[in-house]
Amino acid sequence: MIRDITLGQYYPGESIVHRLDPRIKIIATIAYIVALFIADSFIGIATAAAAVFFAIAVSRVPISFLLRGLKPIFFIIIFTFVLNLFMGSGEVLVTLFWGLKITKNGLTTAVFMAVRLILLIMGSSLLTLTTKPISLTDGIESLLRPLKIFKVPAHELAMMMTIALRFIPTLLEETDKIMKAQQARGADFESGNIFHRAKSLIPILVPLFISAFRIAQELAMAMEARCYHGGDNRTRMNGMKLAGRDFAMLVLLLLFLGIIIGERYFL
């Protein structure tokens, strides 16, 4: 389960999606997430699903790799589906025990919310899977640069966000090592009810926190040894410049948003 989390990982490749400007990919991801919650009909959700599967096909990232990332949030998806299933109103389809009712509106809302969560995870994971951490940092910093007039530390914020994303797979790998080490000493994380399993995970937290602080200290010392002083007067080996494929991506993004917004408010 720990190894199934793909958020924050990078999948090497030379596809068009990999070569897109990171700023375009960040803007496209944010716009896609907003469009997911604007869409409220089958046509809108189907358009969003077609867009993300088209991007996955072009990026050449294995679909099995992305679907594997859904396993850790499977419980959240099911919980969201069941919660929305019994909260609808209108035409009653089924009446269950304790007066619980499944309505047509509740069923539609539950399906839409579950699909939205799945597409949201796949779309956001595609950003980190096709963008190197250093490129992601440069892209976020460039987008936040106009906020410098308000004394917002754009470079520092971008660096913190990227380090946080990059450390997700590192901490997950460390958690996996700790669990295997404790299982070799007789620890049991699989048997018992959900409360027993949660209690058995407590001994993992202490070594995990110690390991996280150790990794953070090593990173801080490495940055100091390289004379890192924030974003002042820093240069880049590879500058960011928009190419033809980036403008084509913007056109496709505007077309996608036009379909979603037009279907929601005008059709």
Image (cartoon, helix red, strand yellow):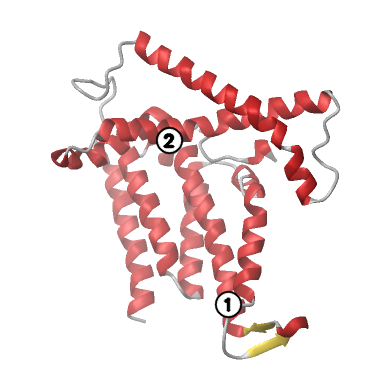
Query: For the residue carrying disc 2, how many other residues have a C-alpha within 10 Å: few (<14), some (14-19), or many (20+)?
Result: many
- Secondary structure type for disc 2: loop
Nearest the viewer among 263 and 138 is 138
- Secondary structure type for disc 1: helix
CA distance for labels 1 and 2: 35 Å
Query: Residue 197 vs residue 228: left or right?
Result: right
Disc 1 marks which residue? Answer: 108
Q: In this view of the protein, can residue 14 be seen by the observer?
A: no
Q: Earlier in the sequence, mark 1 or mark 2?
A: 1
Residue found 74% across the figure and 42% down from its top: 199
* Amino acid type shown at disc 1: Thr
Q: In this view of the protein, can residue 235 be seen by the observer?
A: yes
**Tally of numbered tags:** 2
- Assign the C terminus to one quadrant of the image: bottom left
Residue found 66% across the figure and 62% down from its top: 78
Find residue 43 and report its horizontal and vertical position in percent.
48, 73
Q: Which mark is residue 131?
A: 2
Query: Residue 200, located in which quarter of the rendered image?
Result: top right
Above or below, comparing residue 67 to residue 117 in the picture = above
Above or below, comparing residue 195 to residue 14 in the picture = below
Query: Residue 145 vs residue 246: left or right?
Result: left
Nearest the viewer among 228 and 28 is 228
Find residue 96 and report its horizontal and vertical position in percent.
76, 83
Query: Residue 97, located in which quarter of the rendered image?
Result: bottom right
Find residue 207 and report its horizontal and vertical position in percent.
65, 25
Query: For the residue carrying disc 1, how many other residues have a C-alpha within 10 Å: few (<14), some (14-19), or many (20+)?
Result: some
Q: Which mark is nearer the camera, 1 or 2?
A: 1
Residue found 51% across the figure and 61% down from its top: 49
Find residue 178 and report its horizontal and vertical position in percent.
70, 26
* Amino acid type shown at disc 2: Thr
